[in-house]
Image: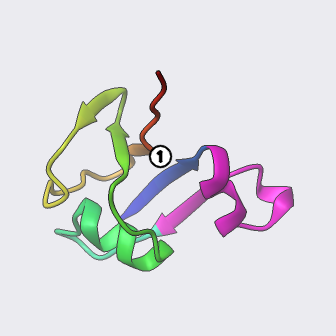
Amino acid sequence: MQIRIVLYSLLRYKLAKETKGRLTLDMPENSSIQDVLDYLMIDPPINISINNQIIENYDNPLAVDCEIHLFRPTGGG
């Protein structure tokens, strides 16, 4: 199944510069967010949005043709 990934901030450095932080992956059926994180070698904590909905469970199954946005948690004070 194909899924689209968009990486933000420092996570963009995981990919070649010309990709501009975007990638399409072919993943096996029943893959989860954790499978994507493992593939990209990204360790939690990480914020995740699937089809514009923030999720917190890394075991969420992925749907065909979904779009995943990954970004580091922000903080300030």
Residue occupied by mark 1: 72
Height in image: 51 above or below 31? above
- Quick one: which residue is furthest to the right in this view? 18
Height in image: 27 above or below 9? below
- Quick one: which residue is furthest to the front in this view? 77
x, y percent for residue 41: 47, 77
> Is 2 situated left or right of 5 in this image?
left
Q: Quadrant of residue 30?
A: bottom left
Residue at point 43%, 61% (across, down): 2
| Picture quarter with the N terminus | bottom left
Magenta highlight range? 9-25
Residue at point 24%, 55% (across, down): 62
Does any portion of residue 61 appear in the rendered image?
yes
Identify the amino acid type marked 1.
Arg
Residue toward you, 36 or 31 = 36
Secondary element under disc 1, as helix, strand or loop, is loop
Height in image: 20 above or below 44? above
Residue 35 included in the magenta stretch of the image: no
What number of labels is visible? 1
> Is 36 situated left or right of 14 in this image?
left
x, y percent for residue 51: 35, 33
Say how the picture is coloured.
Answer: rainbow
Q: Quadrant of residue 52?
A: top left
Residue 12 included in the magenta stretch of the image: yes
Give the class, few, some or many, for how many residues have Cα within 10 Å of label 1's Cα (few <14, many ≥20).
Answer: some
Does any portion of residue 22 appear in the rendered image?
no
Residue at point 77%, 56% (across, down): 19
Residue toward you, 9 or 50 = 9
x, y percent for residue 6: 56, 46
